[in-house]
Structures are given as C-alpha cells and as structure tokens.
C-alpha cells in the first residue's frame, strides 16, 4: 500500500489572543498584535509589551496557568478531532517543552522556602499534567517530553510521525506548552539583544524588513491530533528533518550549511521539489541573522513562486511552543483558505513577503523553526487531500 502521510485532524490552542483556536485564528487574521502592556516587563521595571496567556481555564485542571492551558489545549484538540470523525486507537503523547512549570517553581523557592505539602509538590513535576491528560481520555500509548528550544514544536511533530510510521501507535497528541514570560526571563532576552518590550510588536518586530529590532515575548499552549485514521484533516504532514549547527550558543553558522541541509532533507523526505512549495512559514523572529538564513532558504532551495510570511509580530515568540503555534496557524489556513500573514510596515521588505492576510492557494507549505543554540528544523505540510488517502 502507498505510504499515507499522517494528518492533523484536531487543533486546540491557548495564546495571548485568548483561550481557544478560534481566538488564535481571529486574532491572526485581524492583523492586530496579541498581548499588551504589563507592569514589570519593561526597562527598569516599567510596563512592557508582552504576549501573555490571560488567566482562565478550569481551576480543577491545576493550580497554575501552565497546567490549565496545557489541559485545555489538549481537551479542545481531542474534542475537535472527534467532531471531525477521528476515532482514537493506540494514542501516544509527545510534549514539546523547554522551561516547564516556571510559575510554581518560582513560588516554591521564593514564597514557600522550598517547603510544600506532598500533593502540592507533585504539581511541579513535569509528569503530573501529562498523567492527568492520559487519565482523562483513557490513552495508554507512550508519553515523552522533547526539547529543542524554539524548534521543539516541529521536533514533537516529527517524533510523533516517526512513532506512527514505526507502528508504535496509531495516533499521537502533539502538545507544546510555554508559559515562561516572567519579568526575569523577559529581561534577559532583552539583554541578549533579541527581545523587545518597549514598543508594540509591529513597531519593532518586522521580519524580512529593514529596521527590525527583534521579537516580542509570547506564551502559548497548542495541541494537535496527528493520525492516519479516519477524520477530516486540516493538513497533511508530508515530511521533515532536523539538523544542528554545532557552532555557537546563540549564533547561526554564517555559512548556513546545516540550515540549508535541514530544509533540503525535509523536502527530499517529503518527496517534494522546492518549486512545488507555495509558502515558507518562516521562523521569522525579526533578527538579522534569522532573516538572512531564511531568505537564503527561500532563494536557494524553493521556487520563484514561493511566498514568505511570519507570525511572531502578531502572536509573539512563544519560545518552546513557537513552532507549534505557527504549524497550527498553517493548518488552519488550509481550512479557511486564508494566509494569516502579518502586515508589512516598512518599505524595502523582501519582495516575496506577504503583506497581511489574504487568499491561500492549495499549495505546499514549508515551516522552518531555528532554535537557540543551533537547533534547525523544517516540516513540510500539504493541503488535507495531499498524497494517497489509503
């Protein structure tokens, strides 16, 4: 039987736009930045613009925004998948995460002096919310946390696809959670020269445009159901690849050997020619070195009719959940027939950079994600009817 690419058949999201994938989608296509001014996140403790997940969710899901957002995203994705005809088989869970339960660990040391009741201490463990998810739905496949900095969401998707291909599971809930924008973490990204909090995002974060200063800090929890089984799909996962620069803790190798190899291998693994790619959904944090690297990908590996867009000016840089937010947006784009591109604010932008939301053609999307420290990843997404149906 022909290889059947797995598809995304359920999506759940909690972002700075609000709780639910509808809030994410409506926010993106509005062209308006998520988040707002928050005390303590700007210079010298003044207000700064950050894209924080607002309070919400079910208090019984856990004592923190992290736990509540994680479980809400999974619940929405699973319910969505079932409504679209998915029937769970052997279900595993891959969780993309970098810093984890920041708020509760901060309180553990600073407010509670390292002392908690055992039940409260268990809420800090990375296994607890994932165990709660598996119990809620009666899933019994493998569960892992994966971490590749900002590339973690792509890596989780590729891990899930490998499990399905190997016959380890039938379906995977792919989850990414990052609610780590404390003033302390925000301050250090600003000190690194990449985070920007002193102006609204669209004034500072202008990927592939002159004068971009960096990115707004963001948070998100995103879940997707990946399956080869029945169900109406948002998109197909045709393939992907991962490499590592092995070069520097913060800088991309300027010769770009591993970035280019990653995308070339992703295209080959998906059986796709660069000329067939309609869209490059870029990592796009608005930094000079990332702009240069992804423009090289566009110019050297993809076709002259490939369009470029980035979402970080709108939803923020959601760190360990960044790639997952952007993959979910690309999948929703196929559903709605709209590319949710950020508006262009500067003359001299890359000539293939899309200016705001507009009609989407049913073509292939490459989603690149370049993580701090040299983590390179790319996934190749197609419309829901791409490839054999099995």
Image (spheres, grey):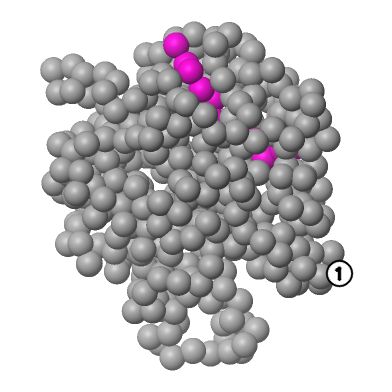
Task: Residue at 36% x, 52% y: name it.
Answer: 12
The magenta stretch is 276-287
Residue 47 % position (x, y): 77, 68
Number of residues whose C-alpha sits closer than 10 Å to that of mark 1, classed few (under 14), some (14–19) or many (20 or more):
few
Task: Residue at 75% x, 63% y: name it.
Answer: 48
Q: Is 155 left or right of 226, judged from the image as shown?
A: right
Quadrant of res 57: bottom left
Task: Residue at 62% x, 11% y: name it.
Answer: 300
Residue 182 % position (x, y): 66, 68
Location of the C terminus (image quadrant): top left
Location of the N terminus (image quadrant): top left
Q: Nearer the viewer, residue 345 or 1?
A: 345
Q: Where is mark 1, residue-wise?
A: 44
Residue 275 vertical position relative to residue 163 in the rendered view, above or below: above
Residue 113 vertical position relative to residue 360 in the rendered view, above or below: below
Q: Is 233 left or right of 121, judged from the image as shown?
A: left
Residue 247 % position (x, y): 70, 33
């Amino acid at each position: 039987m022909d290889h059947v690419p797995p598809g995304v058949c359920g999506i759940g999201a909690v972002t700075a736009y609000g709780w639910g994938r509808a809030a994410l989608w409506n926010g993106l296509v509005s062209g308006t930045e998520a988040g707002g001014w928050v005390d303590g996140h700007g210079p010298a403790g003044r207000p700064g613009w950050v894209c924080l997940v607002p309070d919400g969710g079910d208090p019984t899901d856990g004592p923190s925004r992290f736990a509540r957002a994680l479980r809400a995203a999974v619940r929405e994705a699973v319910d969505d998948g079932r409504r679209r005809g998915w029937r769970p088989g052997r279900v595993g869970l891959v969780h993309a995460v970098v810093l984890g339960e920041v708020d509760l660990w901060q309180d553990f040391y600073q407010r509670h002096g390292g002392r908690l009741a055992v039940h409260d201490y268990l809420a800090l463990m990375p296994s607890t919310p994932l165990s709660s998810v598996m119990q809620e739905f009666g899933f019994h496949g493998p569960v892992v946390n994966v971490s590749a900095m900002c590339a973690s969401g792509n890596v989780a998707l590729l891990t899930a696809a490998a499990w399905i291909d190997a016959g380890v599971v039938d379906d995977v809930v792919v989850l990414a959670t990052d609610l780590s924008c404390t003033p302390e973490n925000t301050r250090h990204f600003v000190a690194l020269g990449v985070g920007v909090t002193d102006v609204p995002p669209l004034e500072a974060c202008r990927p592939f445009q002159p004068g971009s200063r960096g990115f707004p800090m963001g948070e998100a929890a995103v879940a997707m159901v990946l399956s080869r089984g029945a169900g109406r799909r948002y998109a197909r996962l045709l393939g992907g690849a991962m490499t590592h620069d092995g070069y520097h803790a913060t800088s991309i190798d300027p010769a770009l050997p591993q970035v280019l190899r990653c995308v070339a291998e992703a295209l080959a693994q998906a059986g796709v020619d660069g000329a067939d790619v309609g869209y490059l959904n870029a990592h796009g944090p608005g930094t000079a070195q990332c702009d240069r690297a992804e423009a090289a990908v566009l110019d050297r590996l993809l076709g002259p009719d490939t369009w470029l867009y980035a979402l970080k000016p709108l939803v923020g840089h959601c760190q360990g959940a960044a790639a997952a937010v952007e993959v979910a947006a690309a999948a929703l784009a196929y559903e709605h027939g709209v590319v949710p591109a950020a508006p262009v604010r500067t003359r001299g932008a890359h000539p293939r950079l899309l200016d705001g939301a507009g009609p989407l053609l049913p073509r292939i999307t490459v989603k690149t994600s370049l993580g701090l420290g040299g983590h390179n990843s790319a996934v190749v997404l197609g419309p829901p009817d791409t490839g054999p149906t099995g």
